[in-house]
């Protein structure tokens, strides 16, 4: 007995090649708009954290450091969880649905997201873990470099998301020629 695997086939609009049942019902333009919004939010957040928030870390002082870093980790996690989750879902949908005219950009965006996730899990989170134990200038300096890489990766994701949005908007505004 063999299992029948769904074959990708273009939808009648030509926008989607669904790899999974049900994805054809999603609207490409809505997914791309949501991705552009949450990715832009994340780009703004990462640069704000890097240029403003992290720059203030050395001014906290050792007496207040433990409480400050603990509050920072809890609060920033609560702020970023929702938008980052939505951004990740958009990346996943775009990869699975494989929109014909955005396929390469969807893969580039996913690759950048993977880089952000690796940077966060392998370097940024452990640095914050060490800083939760105590203030350490070397760990802080490492965090600044790690986070700068992450900020540039997110900026590149922002460029990809806006480019995708531009392509979708340009596609929907283009006049359709009957019979072509």
Image (cartoon, rainbow, N blue to C red):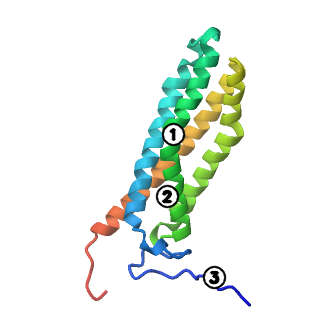
Image location (x, y in percent) of residue 178: 25, 85
**Residue 78 x %, y %:** 52, 36
Name the quarter where the C terminus is drawn.
bottom left
Hey, which quadrant is residue 5 in on the image? Answer: bottom right
Measured along the vertical axis of the image, is residue 62 above or below residue 39? above
Tag 1, which secondary structure?
helix
**On screen, 52 above or below 3?**
above
* Residue at 56 percent of width and 44 percent of height: 153
Residue 116's image quarter?
top right
Spatial separation of the CA atoms under disc 3 and disc 2: 23 Å
Task: Please report whichever mark, 1 or 3, sits nearer to the chain's N-terminal start.
Answer: 3
Which circle marks residue 5 in the picture? 3
Q: Is residue 142 above or below residue 135?
A: below
Badge 3: residue crowd in 10 Å (few <14, some 14–19, many ≥20):
few
Question: Which residue has dot 2 on it?
Answer: 90
Q: Nearer the viewer, residue 155 or 114?
A: 114
Answer whether labels 3 and 2 touch (C-beta < 8 Å). no
Asked whether residue 162 appears in the rendered view, the answer is: no
Q: Which residue is mark 1?
A: 80
**Which image quarter is the N terminus in?**
bottom right
Mark with earlier residue (1, 2):
1
* Residue in the image at 50% along x and 52% along y: 87
Residue at image coords 64%, 18%: 66
The disc, 3 or 2, on the residue closer to the chain's N-terminal end is: 3
Q: Give SS at disc 2.
A: helix
């Amino acid at each position: 007995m063999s299992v029948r695997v769904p074959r990708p086939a273009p939808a009648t609009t030509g926008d989607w090649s669904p790899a999974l049942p049900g994805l054809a019902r999603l609207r490409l333009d809505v997914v791309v708009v949501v991705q552009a919004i949450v990715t832009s939010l994340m780009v703004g957040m990462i640069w704000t954290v890097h240029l403003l928030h992290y720059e203030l870390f050395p001014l906290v002082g050792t007496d207040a450091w433990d409480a400050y870093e603990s509050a920072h980790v809890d609060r920033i996690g609560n702020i970023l969880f929702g938008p980052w989750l939505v951004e990740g879902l958009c990346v996943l949908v775009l990869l699975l649905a494989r929109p014909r005219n955005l396929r390469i950009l969807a893969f580039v965006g996913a690759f950048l997201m993977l880089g952000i996730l690796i940077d966060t899990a392998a370097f940024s989170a452990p640095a914050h873990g060490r800083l939760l134990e105590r203030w350490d200038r070397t760990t802080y300096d490492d965090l600044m470099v790690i986070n700068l890489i992450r900020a540039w990766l997110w900026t590149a994701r922002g460029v990809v998301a806006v480019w995708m949005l531009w392509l979708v908007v340009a596609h929907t505004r283009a006049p359709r020629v009957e019979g072509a």
